[in-house]
Amino acid sequence: LRYGESEANVLDIATSKETREDTPRPVLVFVTGDTFTGDIAAPDLSREMQDQAMCFAARNGMVGIRVNYRLAPAASWPAGATDVAAALSWIHGNIDLFNGDKREIVAIGYGAGAFHIASLLAHPELQNERNEVAAVVLVSGIYRIGKDASDSEKAYFGTDASQYDKRSVFPGILNVDAPILLAWAANDPAGLVTQGETLKKTLCGAG
């Protein structure tokens, strides 16, 4: 379904026939992306994992939504976050058609998707009136880039390193009221592990 003007602004919805007529169901919103430019080492495997997550939601009494968004270099910062904002706004306005409960939206971000969700929550100026979520899951994300940014990161954030801190999730992420589940994998690259540990330390240190 289309949620915005770009051809990339589409989302997929997974639900089950058994959940359409009883009480509204929680909504899992998946925003994924191995890189900011969409480069994936194993695209078929990545898509299969996303499909499994969507089916898991539908089979367990939830509504699963996969959000596709614009990619760098055609779309640079903050396009990813504003696309997520537009998708959430669409979900708030339409999820009742799929028996979803807009009061129980959990946004799950992986990789670049984790940054886009965190960035939206950390920057109020990117939000609109219908971006509320009940909780957030951030998996293997990049939350602040530095001078050693990869080509994919530079394609999204730009080449002016003086702007990187302003475009990170700090310090705005500390003002988020929704519960945050933070995760990374044991075999993630060292840089991703450091990103997760830094965000964890910052959040816990802020109480």
Image (cartoon, rainbow, N blue to C red):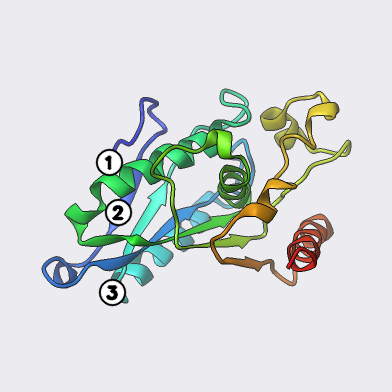
Q: Do the CB atoms of the residues marked 3 and 1 lie less than 8 Å apart?
A: no
Q: Which residue is drawn at 57% across and 39% down?
A: 124
Mark 3 / mark 2, whichever is N-terminal: 2
Kind of residue at disc 1: Leu
Pointer 1: residues within 10 angstroms few (<14), some, or many (20+)?
A: few
- Viewed as shown, does residue 175 lie left or right of 200? left
Single out the mark in the foreground, 3 or 2: 3
Q: Residue at x 15, y 67 (%)?
A: 17
Q: Can residue 69 be seen in this view?
A: no
- Viewed as shown, does residue 113 lie left or right of 2? right
Kind of residue at disc 3: Gly
**Of helix, strand and loop, which one carries label 1?**
loop
Image location (x, y in percent) of residue 183: 66, 68
Q: How far apart are marks 3 and 2 (CA)?
A: 13 Å
Pointer 3: residues within 10 angstroms few (<14), some, or many (20+)?
A: some
Q: Residue 13 carries which label?
A: 2
Mark 2 / mark 1, whichever is N-terminal: 1
Residue to which mark 3 is pinned: 61
Mark 3 / mark 1, whichever is N-terminal: 1
The residue nearer to you, when weighing 169 against 10, is: 169
Residue to which mark 1 is pinned: 1
Q: How far apart are marks 3 and 1 (CA)?
A: 21 Å
Q: Do the CB atoms of the residues marked 3 and 2 lie less than 8 Å apart?
A: no
The residue nearer to you, when weighing 158 against 43, is: 158
